[in-house]
């Protein structure tokens, strides 16, 4: 990495600030057909080009523009004439960023968005965001693992940082909102607050976490886990993706992972706030505008292996069989009954089943399945898993089957900060927004951050509860509400309070 391009400065952890207004229309230019690290070195900030390298593209042609334009005069965005120019500018900025992000990793129509960690689409999206942060006059830096920060320094040094953001990676063929909404809303909020209110008392930072989904490498939360210290390169560097590439190799190829780059772990955080799509159907079904997450559910994943005896399907009498699949089926039906009896918020799922020999005329000698169990209470989760384990053992014994259950993953429930949740609730009621407190069944970056600082999450509805698919959708007015609420909370915390992160009720 010997280039002197602006992006390389950012990658090296140096501020890119101080180049503000005359860079109004910079774009990240990358060369095609080059290795990713060359692309990074050669990525240049070029003046007088349209945003996002999309010559002639115009986000205003999207569905979002209709909402924005409807709020203003016909066809044109006239912020100052609108009833609330601040809210209007804020939501325009969020829509603009969200639309722009959806072009990185976007496939053919209907193919969704695939932006896997350290791939070219991922890198270009991060560089685009770095450029946008820079244009807005934020101090921009990447850490060693590729988390991107845009910092707005507060006037009261020594106070902890208020961090807001989400993740930039997606699942394969994912949607346009998961992660990207939180990044776009956070950046729009901080930029708009800066424009409207100037320098905050307490430092605000936007973060675009490098990875959350676990879609390329078989583990999740690499971005936020590196920040909290839960995950470290020494332990994860040799983990391989589906093509046999190690995390370390992929990092280096993308221009990260070098010792001179900034250490990802942080101990200066005072609060973390994240906006996300619900990825569930509760808000839509109940006609609620905002979800305030009380707890991110704890999760246990097991593999269950059952060994019986493979034998001839025609010659083995029913009473003389040790059918592994019949045993597995009994276990699954019982699991569903037990989960229904336990009631919400417990959920239990068998998502994968493998049989051996998996042939029509042979009694299955082996059956393996996965078990995913989630609950907001650690005690309830543990107790339920214990009862399931016992019940499975009973079924196996009665059928003469061998049983091996192995715990593969254990994530404790992560309670969000009650004080921040209360603030969000009051902000909703003062705005006439309907809201409900809820448990997030899905995992999020906020659950890791909650271990090191007060954390809050707010949800906007997902149409049909669908996520991790190209059909993922949230209506523009719902996106706008979530973004405005985030900006209002950040304003309270960073501009109004003497010591926002202290004295929150736990
Ligand atoms: Zn997400």
Image (cartoon, helix red, strand yellow):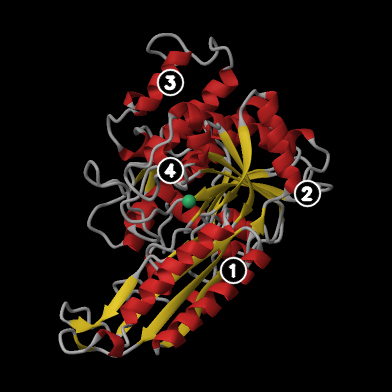
Q: Is mark 4 within 8 Å of ligand 1?
A: no
Above/below status of 127 relative to 145: above
Residue appearing at x 43%, y 79% in the figure: 304
Above/below status of 227 relative to 185: below
Q: Is mark 1 within 8 Å of ligand 1?
A: no
Residue 502, how many percent across, how many down? 82, 48
Residue 238 seen in this snapshot: no
How far apart are the alpha carbons under marks 2 and 3?
38 Å
Residue of label 1: 384
Number of residues whose C-alpha sits closer than 10 Å to that of mark 1, classed few (under 14), some (14–19) or many (20 or more):
many
Residue appearing at x 40%, y 90% in the figure: 400
Front: mark 2 or 1: 1
Label 1, secondary structure: give it: helix
For this view, does 202 lie left or right of residue 303? right
Looking at the rendered structure, which numbered label has been put on residue 67? Answer: 3
Label 2, secondary structure: give it: loop
Looking at the rendered structure, which numbered label has been put on residue 159? Answer: 2
Q: Are marks 4 and 2 in contact (CB under 8 Å)?
A: no
Front: mark 2 or 3: 3
Task: Looking at the image, tell me whether mark 4 or mark 2 is earlier in sequence order.
Answer: 2
Nearest to the observer: residue 360 or residue 471? 360
For this view, does 393 lie left or right of residue 174? right
Q: Are marks 2 and 3 in contact (CB under 8 Å)?
A: no
Q: Are marks 4 and 1 in contact (CB under 8 Å)?
A: no
Looking at the rendered structure, which numbered label has been put on residue 108? Answer: none
How far apart are the alpha carbons under marks 4 and 1?
26 Å
Q: Quadrant of the N terminus?
A: bottom left
Residue 19, how many percent across, how many down? 53, 39
């Amino acid at each position: 990495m010997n280039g002197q391009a602006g992006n390389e400065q950012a990658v090296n952890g140096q501020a890119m600030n101080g180049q503000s207004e005359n860079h109004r229309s910079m774009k990240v230019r990358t060369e095609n057909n080059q290795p990713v690290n060359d692309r990074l070195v050669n990525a240049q900030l070029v003046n007088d080009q349209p945003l996002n390298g999309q010559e002639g593209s115009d986000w205003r042609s999207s569905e979002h523009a209709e909402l924005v334009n409807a709020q203003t005069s016909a066809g044109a965005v006239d912020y100052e004439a609108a009833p609330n120019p601040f809210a209007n500018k804020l939501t325009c900025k969020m829509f603009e960023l969200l639309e722009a992000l959806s072009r990185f990793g976007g496939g053919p129509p209907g193919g969704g968005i695939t932006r896997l960690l350290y791939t070219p689409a991922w890198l270009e999206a991060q560089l685009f965001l770095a450029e946008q942060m820079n244009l807005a006059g934020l101090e921009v830096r990447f850490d060693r693992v590729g988390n991107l920060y845009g910092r707005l320094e507060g006037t009261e040094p020594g106070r902890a940082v208020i961090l807001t953001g989400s993740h930039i990676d997606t699942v394969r063929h994912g949607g346009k909102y998961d992660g990207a909404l939180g990044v776009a809303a956070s950046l729009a909020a901080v930029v708009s607050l800066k424009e409207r209110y100037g320098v905050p008392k307490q430092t605000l930072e936007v973060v675009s976490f490098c990875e959350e989904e676990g879609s390329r490498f078989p583990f999740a939360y690499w971005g936020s886990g590196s920040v909290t210290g839960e995950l470290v390169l020494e332990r994860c560097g040799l983990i391989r993706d589906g093509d046999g590439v190690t995390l370390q190799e992929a990092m280096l190829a993308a221009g990260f992972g070098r010792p001179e780059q900034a250490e990802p772990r942080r101990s200066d955080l005072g609060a973390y706030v994240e906006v996300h799509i619900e990825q569930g159907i509760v808000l839509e079904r109940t006609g609620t505008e905002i979800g305030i997450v009380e707890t991110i559910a704890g999760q246990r994943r097991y593999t269950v292996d059952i060994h019986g005896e493979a034998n001839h399907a025609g010659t083995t009498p029913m009473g003389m069989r040790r059918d592994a699949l019949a045993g597995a089926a009994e276990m699954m039906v019982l699991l569903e009954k037990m989960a229904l009896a336990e009631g919400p918020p417990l959920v239990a799922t068998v998502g994968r089943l493998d049989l051996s020999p998996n042939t029509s005329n042979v009694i299955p000698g082996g059956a393996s399945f996965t078990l995913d169990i989630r609950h907001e209470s650690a005690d309830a989760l543990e107790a339920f898993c214990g009862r399931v384990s016992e019940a499975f053992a009973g079924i196996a014994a009665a059928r003469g089957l061998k049983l091996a259950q192995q715990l593969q993953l254990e994530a404790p429930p992560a309670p969000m900060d009650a004080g921040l949740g209360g603030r969000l609730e009051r902000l909703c009621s003062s705005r006439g927004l309907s809201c409900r407190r809820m448990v997030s069944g899905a995992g999020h970056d906020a659950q890791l951050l909650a271990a090191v600082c007060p954390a809050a999450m707010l949800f906007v509805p997902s149409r049909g509860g669908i996520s991790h698919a190209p059909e993922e959708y949230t209506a523009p007015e719902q996106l706008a509400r979530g973004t405005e609420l985030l900006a209002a909370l950040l304003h309270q915390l960073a501009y109004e309070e003497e010591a926002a992160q202290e004295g929150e009720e736990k």
